[in-house]
Image (cartoon, rainbow, N blue to C red):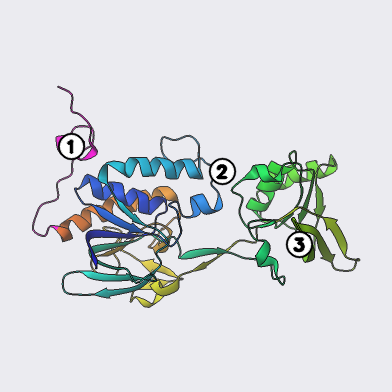
Amino acid sequence: MPINTDALIVGAGPSGLFQIFELGLLGIKAHILDSLPTPGGQCTELYPDKPIYDIPAIPVCSGQELIDNLLKQAEPFGPTFHFNEEVTGLEQADGYFKVTTANDQEFHAKTVFIAGGVGSFQPRRFRLDGVDALEGISVHYRVKQPEIFTDKKVVICGGGDSALDWALDLADKAAELTLVHRRDEYRAAPASVAALKELEAAGKVRILENAKASAYTTSDDGLNSVTISSKGIDDLTLEADHLLAFFGLAPKLGPIAEWGFTLTKKAIEVDTEKFETNIPGIFAIGDINTYPGKKKLILSGFHEAALAAFAAKAIIEPGKKVALQYTTTSPVMHKRLGVEDDE
């Protein structure tokens, strides 16, 4: 049976989770979809343990801590989550939008909020035969459990911030650590490059530039060795327990590109009053949208979610004035939040 809802949010990253809260303050209950098995989007998939410094009033938190706090903040509004659900279709019907998923679930929603980042992020992977079988065991494109690399022989490939950040983090923990980079110029912060060079000089890290991982061998326990190829010199074979790659991410917009939105460089154009798309009743917030002056920051997505919620309220309850109330003083807001008013 179709699931009927006033608001359907596509994407359970930071912007999508805050959208639940902003809708809830206005008395709107939301259903939220995500193709991943857990909430969090990039925060939990790519940098759960990395610090974030630019969330207002929170001097520092990890990606996972931010998601945990957003989920706690949304709890009073009883959102319904649907994970492992990839949206495949969106159609306009009589007074609602019909949204379908790859699992043949159907939603009928009065308003829809696209909060899917820039689509489905996929890490760029090694092009080595059979290496996919080692993913999550000996080959990694993200770090979820840094402790597994303690006292292990680790090879990291890449020259951006993620590669160098993890090389710096693991230098004192791994038994051996090698950084392999295709060039001799880095995309990482200069301070990180300088710190890595200092570790190399101290004998804690091996750096191989203008090189790439070209082959590997395995044993019963997983990875056994990695062969590094460089122009003009013989191949070098390194013993290795783990191989990490940080080649960046390739976003895939997927079916969204075919839903009739006005797109600019794979982002959905919105206005800056309501963050509504060219299809009335469908909003786009966070990294998926674009407008003059757009900055792809988490805090920008929070602002966009607030204004989109007010616009959605006017659609869900047409003709009814949407009053601006403050959580500090409004009894209505306190009731929705489940907090007691002082006598």
Image quadrant assignment for residue 77 = top left
Image quadrant assignment for residue 229 = bottom right
Quadrant holding the N terminus: bottom left
* x and y percentages locating residue 177 in the rendered image: 78, 48
> Looking at the picture, does residue 324 appear above or below residue 328?
below
Magenta segment's dominant SS is loop
* x and y percentages locating residue 221 in the rendered image: 74, 55
Instruction: Say whether residue 141 is visible.
Output: yes
The residue located at (72%, 48%) in the rendering is 193
Q: Which residues are magenta?
A: 317-343
Circle 2 residue = 49
Circle 3 residue = 183
**27 horizontally vs 14: left or right:** left
**186 horizontally vs 201: left or right:** left
Q: CA distance from mark 1 to mark 2?
A: 35 Å
* x and y percentages locating residue 320 in the rendered image: 9, 54
Instruction: Say whether residue 54 is visible.
Output: no
The residue located at (20%, 47%) in the rendering is 26
Looking at the rendered structure, which numbered label has been put on residue 335? 1
Which residue is more in the foreground, 283 or 157? 157
Tag 2: amino acid: Asp
**Element marked by disc 1:** helix
* x and y percentages locating residue 106 in the rendered image: 29, 69
Is residue 224 found inside the magenta-colored segment of the image?
Answer: no
